[in-house]
């Protein structure tokens, strides 16, 4: 089974960072990561990659055009089965509250704690197996 994690971020260096952090997993085929440069592209990809392949969406909050918070209810409407974790440089209580109210399963702050993210991914992969 191909297992996908969709990462949504408008910063081009994010893809390189994630590929570096998860290189062993990606090389072994444990899961695949797709990268969407904007919220509209992410919604399209989330709709196209059908269950059970898509196990997690990681999305930046601050992006030009449609923000991650604006994307969240739209992607949840299309894929209520797929958990969404928001990523932000601003981990204040108000941002966390907005993310959870709009359907986020969690919030990670930058710089990303990749050990914590790996635990989250391992948990999602276990549920998908």
Image (cartoon, grey):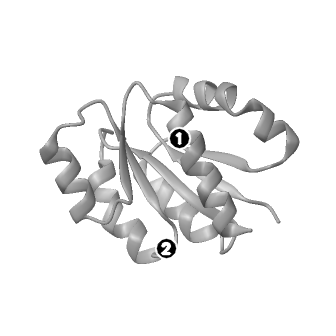
- SS class of the residue under badge 1? helix
Q: Residue at x 47, y 30 (%)?
A: 113
Q: Position of residue 21 (x, y in %)?
A: 65, 28
Q: Quadrant of the C terminus?
A: bottom right
Residue 109 shown left or right of residue 1 in the figure: left
Q: Residue 35's quadrant in the figure?
A: top right
Residue furthest to the left in view is 94
- What residue sits right under mark 1 in the picture? 117
Q: Position of residue 74 (x, y in %)?
A: 36, 68
Q: Residue at x 77, y 40 (%)?
A: 25
Q: Is residue 117 above or below residue 111?
A: below
37 or 59, which lies in front?
Answer: 59
Q: How many marks?
A: 2
Q: Which mark is residue 79?
A: 2
- SS class of the residue under badge 2? loop
Q: Position of residue 109 (x, y in %)?
A: 34, 34
Q: Between marks 1 and 2, how big is the CA–CA gap?
A: 21 Å
Report crowding for label 2: few under 14, some 14 to 19, many 20 or more residues within 10 A (C-alpha).
Answer: some
Chain-order first, disc 1 or disc 2: 2
């Amino acid at each position: 089974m191909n297992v996908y994690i969709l990462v949504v971020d408008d910063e081009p260096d994010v893809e390189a960072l994630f590929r570096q952090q998860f290189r062993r997993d990606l090389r072994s085929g444990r899961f695949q990561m797709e990268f969407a440069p904007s919220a509209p592209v992410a919604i399209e990809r989330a709709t196209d990659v059908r269950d059970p392949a898509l196990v997690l969406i990681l999305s930046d909050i601050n992006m030009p055009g449609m923000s991650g918070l604006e994307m969240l209810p739209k992607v949840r409407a299309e894929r209520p089965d797929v958990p969404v974790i928001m990523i932000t440089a601003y981990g204040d209580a108000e941002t966390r509250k907005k993310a959870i109210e709009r359907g986020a399963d969690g919030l990670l702050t930058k710089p990303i704690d990749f050990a914590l993210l790996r635990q989250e991914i391992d948990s999602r992969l276990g549920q998908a197996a």
